[in-house]
Amino acid sequence: MPYVIDDRETPRFRVARSTMVDAAILEEERRNIFDKSWLFVGHESEIDNPHDFRTRNVGGRPIIFTRNADREVRVFVNSCPHRGMQIETRGEGHGRFLKCFYHGWSFNTSGDLVAIPGEDSYGENFDRHNLCLVRPAKVESYRGFVFLSWTNDIADLQTYLAGATDILDLFADQSELGMQIIGGSHLYSVQANWKLLSENSADGYHALTTHHRYLVMLKESGKDLSKVFAAGPAPFMGYDLGNGHAVIGGADGTGGGNSGLGRDLSGDGLLQQMKRRDRFAELYGADWANRMFSGRNLVIFPNLAVIDLIMGITLRTYYPVAPGYMEVSAWSLQPKDDDPELRRMRQENFLTFWGPAGLATPDDVEALQRCQRGFAAHDVAPWNDISRGMASERKIFTDELQMRVFWREWDRRMTGTEHAPETPQLGKRGRVGWPGQLSSTP
Amino acid sequence: MSTRNESAVAAPAQMADAELSREVELFLYHDALLLDEWRLREWFALFTPDCEYLIPTTDRPDGDPEHDLFFVRDDWFLLSQRVDALVDGTAWTESPHSITKHMVNNVMAWLDPDGSVAIRANFVVYRSALSTVDVYPGSYRMRLLRGGPAGFEIQSRRCTLALAQLRPHGRVSVIL
Ligand code: FES
Ligand SMILES: [Fe+2]
């Protein structure tokens, strides 16, 4: 039985629910997807100073994410070259040396083994250089976003990211001083298959129903929702960015003037925001600034979502522990130079929607978990339908193009089946020439 | 947002006030009862208009809501919205309502010179839905004012989870 049925005639797109529950499929995903992709490690701002470190799991392996004395970003496997102990278990910290307490070996933040108790017992030919901390095959970063690959056999990061680089620019451009991940993480889980979160993170279709209570809150706060959902000159659309990456987003034409899915900014905050918008219009052009200050949901294959609701950017990565259980880690990305009023609004908007106790995310968690429960009947009810918008030329954000983009890449990796793109793929274009730019929209 | 941030309240040096602590303990039992019986509008009526309801993240338990990421940072309006959705069934994650039990103990209270009451207490909240039971241990820091039909009103409620991660819970969908 195929995993993906991509019928362009009818048209109809179906995905086998067995892919969500089968442990053998998860093992193949580890080999064919997670071990052959660029995986998100962290943001450079999390390790601002030399010897700052963070620990996390990337692609199922424990890693240490740090910066050495020369300020270079370093990623190490968090396992002692001696006999394997996980060296650091704190989530974050600072220290010139990474010390393994088991037998006392110490490493510097370049990964060199710098001290061994009783080194003379190893004989003359002993070479410490053979016992440095192990590194992933590759580590590269794009505009502050650091990724690793567990294989050497992979294109460079920018080539892999393809058109997603432009979308990352839309986040990174939002501060001239740089963007930062603020302190604190949302470390939670979902009892559902990891692919459901790749789907859900750019699912415009579920907003009105699943997030009803969030929208009610916005309305009660005095927000004019018709403005948010109005089809502007370049409304939210879905785009295939190549290599399984996709985005829904747009340029709403108001340049972020309280048009996003957050509570309206106060007079002062709004003024600040408009000042920023104008500054970026000067730097990058009005079209790009408009796009920057509109929202977007970006999913980078396989397991990174970067979502801007306007005033609240979340970075979220997730990894399957079992077919029906994933661990999610999420952070808040903000401009370094927000003034306090804007920062407060940003914090508030972020939390109101995002996170395991927001007014939105818990309902996503519930939806995904209930899907997973439904998949228990996959043998008698075997298919998910992801056909929405397949029949139309223009793919709007409430269509399901972005999920089909994910699944076509998934199927290519898993079964070797090549699916022709449904829409032209947008490679890297830079800050010009995006479809739906205000100046190029009829 | 309230101007008084409970995270800024230092650990009191003096022993708690015994009589006041007993009084506050009964108030917290009342609070827990309303939550467990899902009488959330009555519960919400315990709050002052300038209230705040905070839950720091598991990795920044002493975080400052102005600078750090939190799980919850509600003012009166957001808390009222949270309560409304939990009551009317549009908070899907609590629809149908889960079964909860709020256990409160280690209650300590101090009277401040301005007449407000600073409290510390521990809690364990059990939440059962479908086939799972989630356990949320943690501690309360609250700022209470004298007044209202229940004897006190809540100006600030900070619930710090004694959990390293929100796994496998995945969410805090009930009120702590
Ligand atoms: S395992 Fe680390 S020093 Fe022995
Ligand atoms: Fe959602």
Image (cartoon, rainbow, N blue to C red):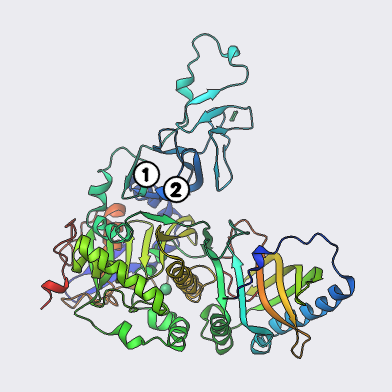
Which sits in the foreground, A416 or B74?
A: B74
Which sits in the foreground, A402 or A410?
A: A402
Q: How many C-alpha atoms fall within 10 Å of the one at disc 1: few (<14), some, or many (≥20)?
A: many
Examine the rendering and report whether any part of residue A339 can be seen: yes
B143 to the left or right of B66:
right
Q: Position of residue B24 (x, y in %)?
A: 81, 77
| Residue at figure coordinates x 66%, y 75% from the top left | B156
| Residue at figure coordinates x 46%, y 66% from the top left | A340
Marks 2,1: beta carbons within 8 A = yes
Amino acid, disc 1: Leu
Q: CA distance from mark 2 to mark 1?
A: 8 Å
Dot 1 lies on which element?
strand
Residue B20: image quadrant is bottom right
Q: Position of residue A137 (x, y in %)?
A: 36, 37
Residue designated by label 2: A58
Amino acid, disc 2: Val
Residue designated by label 1: A148
Q: Residue furthest top?
A: A124
* Residue A166 numbered tag: none
Image quadrant for the N terminus of chain A? bottom left
